[in-house]
Image (spheres, grey):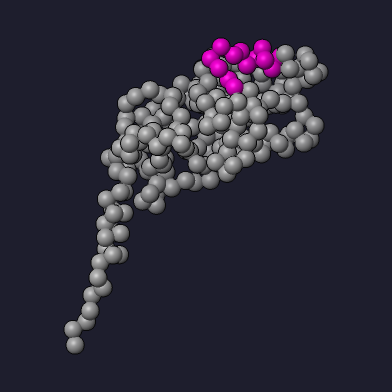
Amino acid sequence: MAILRFSFGTMGSGKSTLALQIHHNLRERGLQGILCSQLDRADGRVSSALGVSADAVEVGPRLDLFEMALAVASRRGRIDYLVCDEAQFYLPSQIDQLARIVDDLGADVFAFGLLTSFQGELFDGTRRLLEVADERVEVQVEARCWCGERATHNARLVDGVQVYDGALFVVDDPEDHVVTYELRCRRHWTTGDSGVRRQAGALLDSDAEPAHEVA
């Protein structure tokens, strides 16, 4: 029986790596499938922070995922699976299309995405996935905040300062350090604390002259 599985985690938890691995394994078994993404760091591909990538269908707001899967099934004789990375960016209607692919076409759908935005709120696509998915699985590769606690939130930084307002969809660019993202525990996401002062203090302490015993 086909399923819609939603695997979620913070940035850096290995979601894209797992998506690529599932796509590779199923394709190697001779199954017919589609790899999809949206707003990945590499346009038209799913890319992992580990440097692995593969060509993918770019899911724009006008793409009907059910019609796309139906066309592939008609052309190839069947459709066995979809692997959907960055699914938090999909429209709720597109999440419903994924559910229809499972129910009407009998294809498995493996969706991967974030739970919350830099504002600490569920993405619309994530909310719909949580509502309709057959399985909801947290990716078990735990990422950590700078303090060492488990990271639960994604912080957006502009010129090194955490922000809570702005456009929802902004992808960080490794060549442009104006907008970056960091993982934070809930406490340090709430306070906007990046640990810079503590790290700077530790550096100053390490540079200080060692104390000498008085004879």
Q: Residue lying farthest left? A: 214
All told, the count of numbered labels is 0
Residue drawn at x 45%, y 33% as measured from the top left? 172
Residue drawn at x 38%, y 42% as measured from the top left? 184
User: In the picture provided, is 99 more to the left or to the right than 8?
Assistant: right
Relative to residue 181, is residue 111 depicted above or below?
Answer: above
Start-end of magenta stretch: 58-70
Q: Nearer the viewer, residue 116 or 165?
A: 165
Question: Residue 186, image x and y in percent?
Answer: 35, 40
User: In the picture provided, is 163 more to the left or to the right than 29?
Assistant: left
Relative to residue 79, is residue 188 depicted above or below?
Answer: below
Q: Residue lying farthest front? A: 175
Residue drawn at x 66%, y 39% as measured from the top left? 21
**Residue 2 appears in view:** no
**Which quadrant: the C terminus?**
bottom left
Question: Residue 202, image x and y in percent?
Answer: 29, 59
* Residue 25 figure quarter: top right
Question: Residue 151, image x and y in percent?
Answer: 42, 43
**Which quadrant: the N terminus?**
top right
**Residue 30 appears in view:** yes
* Residue 83 figure quarter: top right
**57 drawn magenta:** no
**59 drawn magenta:** yes
User: In the picture provided, is 93 more to the left or to the right than 150?
Assistant: right
Question: Residue 20, image x and y in percent?
Answer: 64, 36
Q: Residue lying farthest bottom? A: 215
